[in-house]
Image (spheres, coloured by chain):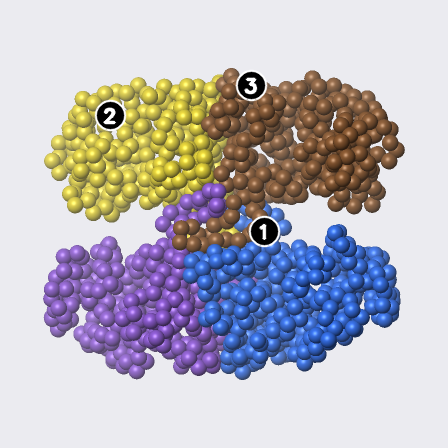
Chain colours: A blue, B purple, C yellow, D brown
Amino acid sequence: MQTLGLALMGTGRMAHVYGPKINAHPGLRLEVIYNPRLTSAKAAAEHYGGRPKDDLDAVLSDPKVDAVVIATPTDTHVDYIEAAARAGKAIYCEKPVDQSLDRVDRAMMTLRDHPVPFMLGFNRRFDPDNAALREAVTRGEIGRLNMLMSWSREPSPPPIDYVRTSGGYFLDATIHDIDLLCWIAGERPIEVSAAGSCMFDPQIGAEGDFDMTMTTLKMPSGALVHINNSRKCAYGFDQRLEAFGDDGMVQTINHRDDNLLRWNKTRTAAHEPLKHFFLERYDQSFYNALDEFHRAVTSGRTPPATAEDGRAALAIALACTQSARTGRAVAPAVG
Amino acid sequence: MQTLGLALMGTGRMAHVYGPKINAHPGLRLEVIYNPRLTSAKAAAEHYGGRPKDDLDAVLSDPKVDAVVIATPTDTHVDYIEAAARAGKAIYCEKPVDQSLDRVDRAMMTLRDHPVPFMLGFNRRFDPDNAALREAVTRGEIGRLNMLMSWSREPSPPPIDYVRTSGGYFLDATIHDIDLLCWIAGERPIEVSAAGSCMFDPQIGAEGDFDMTMTTLKMPSGALVHINNSRKCAYGFDQRLEAFGDDGMVQTINHRDDNLLRWNKTRTAAHEPLKHFFLERYDQSFYNALDEFHRAVTSGRTPPATAEDGRAALAIALACTQSARTGRAVAPAVG
Amino acid sequence: MQTLGLALMGTGRMAHVYGPKINAHPGLRLEVIYNPRLTSAKAAAEHYGGRPKDDLDAVLSDPKVDAVVIATPTDTHVDYIEAAARAGKAIYCEKPVDQSLDRVDRAMMTLRDHPVPFMLGFNRRFDPDNAALREAVTRGEIGRLNMLMSWSREPSPPPIDYVRTSGGYFLDATIHDIDLLCWIAGERPIEVSAAGSCMFDPQIGAEGDFDMTMTTLKMPSGALVHINNSRKCAYGFDQRLEAFGDDGMVQTINHRDDNLLRWNKTRTAAHEPLKHFFLERYDQSFYNALDEFHRAVTSGRTPPATAEDGRAALAIALACTQSARTGRAVAPAVG
Amino acid sequence: MQTLGLALMGTGRMAHVYGPKINAHPGLRLEVIYNPRLTSAKAAAEHYGGRPKDDLDAVLSDPKVDAVVIATPTDTHVDYIEAAARAGKAIYCEKPVDQSLDRVDRAMMTLRDHPVPFMLGFNRRFDPDNAALREAVTRGEIGRLNMLMSWSREPSPPPIDYVRTSGGYFLDATIHDIDLLCWIAGERPIEVSAAGSCMFDPQIGAEGDFDMTMTTLKMPSGALVHINNSRKCAYGFDQRLEAFGDDGMVQTINHRDDNLLRWNKTRTAAHEPLKHFFLERYDQSFYNALDEFHRAVTSGRTPPATAEDGRAALAIALACTQSARTGRAVAPAVG
């Protein structure tokens, strides 16, 4: 197995997701952990290994670094993408590319001029259940796809500071469902409409944002898509898909920590609550995403989630935002 | 138990639903079966008993007739309602009152002037599972209601002649979900948006109608509602509800003819297909609806589904139709 | 539909089960309610109709009485069977015929001499789910039957006075499973072994009886059968079947009063507790049993659960009792 | 984390199970792969690393070898245990210790004289679901334990040569359930009875062995235990536990490769078949067992599955064999 030397860019929450998975993968070698503040890089390197660095040029000119894993704050992604592309490094970038279509376009232009392998971290595609559902749909198990539904309900709202810089709920959360469902359907919407409310957290409402939304996508084939998002969920991280077609339906089931059924005098055949949140529920998907990246780069194939996929999901999420605010169906600017 | 003498108006499909249930109910006595064509009335009377009649005045002046069950074609409902109200008979009317808001208003005016007991046959409210879900929501089992979802997927499209006079899919099918969900939520939408496609049956599309739709209702409380309708469903009559609140979720489960799980080399823990269609799935609910009518009339209470409920559901369904055609959210004309 | 006039013998618990079902059946007419104490007969007749009688001869010579439904204490069954057979009345007898093989043989001899239609009330055969499982097995859905399992766990122990006269737990409870499983398998055991404990109710142990048992039957085909009985069950009346064969497995699912799934912060996808006990769980089966009786008598067919079936189940239950006491496998005296 | 150097004894099926798991564990280092035939050792070492060896003394005197993992044919286990114990090496031994109680006693005597850490590979204890069920029972979630059930149905019979040397089905398969259930119950049976049939494979019957069995254990507390074994199962490797107590029940659910539900016109809410066999179903448990061994050895604790546990399970399995042959309940020779 060909080994790739990696620079892990960033030391925040997502870097702590990727660090252990890089170490667990036999074909990935953590060479460098980068943070402009050296103390942060050093602290992370103590956990995951790799050389701590605060000098970007040194990282990108390091011949032992074959690829970068960008796990920095969203508004820095494009800068790191451009620098890494110019340095000829393969790039795995946590989603989204950026919250602005203009900046995404700039990054895509740079990638066209400096065609390095690039993969966007739409990790949910690489969850085994989601992938199995897509495969069932693709091989025709339910006939032609008619309706597609996704639930993504988070256990609790994020801190209000996070909400403020998140670009709004559609860009922060719905974008995951959008990418996943377009990938499953094999097409992108010609029209979106969305409705949102703020019922849990008045602070979120005060920012003009929503804490629960329902989104409808209309696909070129006629297929209709529903996305169900909530920023609070009492029983854990509710993650479901339902694909309905001419010949039947496939659904994914939620995950728990154990597989016990409980029977007592108040409730029967009960499961425990769901996996708490995305770190628990999608743990495997992050590993699988890195594995796909490794396989694509070492075999010369195009990685399976592109910058263009990221641009499309962003354009659709922006259209959702506009629809929720205006009460009109919006045609997103996607190919 | 006080007994009510009934005149069953009409001898079509719905009359065949109500006939046996009237006979099974210990407090209802089928006095008359009415059809303007006497041969039809006679044929039905051979099945269900009662005196066959083709003379409306005779039926409505018959002192043994305490109440009428209107199961005639939709466009005749209002005429029979008005005649029965003027004759002082209690009225159970199959839904909808009419497809036109104006005619519904006319019927309501007549009922105001001639205040007889009136109940509209929104039978799904009287299904034990739907009622149990509403009761769980009402007693606060899931905290405040945030999201409400309904699936209603029919096994196969109706004949095109039926489609032509049905008033469109929203008036024909969605109206059931609309009434049920407003009844569960205890409120009516301030805004609706809907999307429709025609994927199965080009004839339906040629009529400008849809064979699958997704509808979103926005409630005054902020609660969001999704309605999922399809005119075809490979695995039977898919009828589900999901109520999501601050403290949890309740869902209803589909019904089958047996309660067996099957395990073989291709599939495990499999159920048989669902109940075929509404006659099989909601059989009990029609009986329960008549029972509610009996109890209301004999005790002097207002029946639990009013003409005003029917007017509201119609107004919302009309708003859905408009939204699906224009791509804009519409505020329905409801109180 | 040909109507049968019935005399309901007895006014105890089982008579209260059969009374309403006789009235609900369009082909059965409750002519007489019999109890040697006229006040008891009168009280029951006020609930269910029929003429109250305390004179057995008058009942059995009444030309309006076509058949008797014997729902008296077990130790009187044989006497009523013999009297009714001699009077030429068709007989539906609540199980068991008797706790003594000798007395059962006596009854069977009388029935041979006076061949009236006779049906034993093994109601669980007529439960729709149990019947569906048998049909799946019979039509070969799981290939050849290899293993068969039955759970029957009751919500709470009966009064100790009932236990004392019940003939022991195997004769009281296991006998139901024995009949059901032999009927499904289409064969009767060549060997039984059983183990019992008394964990809940020391009074039951003091009587030398058990409050939980596990029973194994070995069938002539080689098929193995497990019966799981408990006199206490925290979550309701646990009634399950599992049939395992060369090509797969079928299982029946427990019943509840509603079909809701509940999700909250401690448990997810939870059902409510099971139906409380046999009156709730097997309500339909008693009606179906009477319906089978009606159809057999009016069509001249042999009723589907015979005195010989009752004798076999009793012989097997007695062998179980012996095995649990001696620790040895026992060959029951069955054909 | 303290690292243990391991010698993997044997290169057969179980060695191929342990090899990759040793390599995946950060605290285990595969030093040596031993087989008396050097070519076999070399072939295995090419897969898993480690130095190939055919000289037992050299292996056991190697200071880099802290412990041995015995994965050789069953009839050689005792010899390797004794040699390793005398050499002062910690021992992880695949189950069973031996098929003969005498030889097990001999091994235990040697271990008393040479008290090295010893762990028996009862891997099913270390399956997360089985462990979660035991924990639920232990912390009193169902009150006092009354009944315990285990299903273990294998997808297809082993080769007849394997059957011949397996010691019979109870020693080969039931022994797993016996150990697991005694461990969950926290007690060992005072009496066992078993019934067996041979329905699938006449060759197995010709050896005097069974291909399906039902076993009952009676515990000192009064708790009753049922074990359900089959050497064929159409739908995969059926592995279930059910623990029933005063206050309720807990059950484990079977595992599949995906978590999809399928709905089509013949079956609804269907899962795919089960994990094929023990390598797929219990993959995690083997890793966890090695991890428990590592933790026990490096911390000085007694490993969680002892030679004495193995002796008890063997004695009980031998009693089952005797009971199935004689039709009598047997008191196993356990403490």
Q: CA distance from mark 1 to mark 2?
A: 55 Å
For label 1, the SS is loop
Front: mark 3 or 1: 3
Res C247 visible: yes
The location of residue C68, given as percent across then percent down, is 21, 34
Q: Are marks 3 and 1 on the same chain?
A: no
Q: Residue D207, percent across and down? A: 54, 20
Residue positioned 17% across, 38% down in the render: C298
Residue B111 occupies which quadrant of the picture?
bottom left
Say which element carries label 2.
helix
Give the mark toward the camera: 2 or 3: 3
Task: Tell me the quarter of the picture where residue A135 sits.
Answer: bottom right
Side of C107 relative to D312 (left or right): left
Report in which chain the residue with disc 2 lies: C
Disc 3 chain ID: D
Residue type highlighted by circle 1: Glu
Residue A200: x, y in percent? 59, 70
Residue in the picture at 24% in, 73% down: B77
- Above or below, C249 relative to B28: above
Q: Which residue is mark 3?
A: D322
Q: CA distance from mark 2 to mark 3?
A: 47 Å
> Split into 4 quadrants, where in the image is the C terminus of chain C?
top left
Q: Whole-percent x and y of residue C285?
A: 32, 42
Given the image, on which type of amino acid does mark 2 rest? Answer: Asp
Location of mark 2 (residue): C79
The residue pinned by badge 1 equals: A272
From mark 3 to mark 1, how far is it between C-alphas?
42 Å
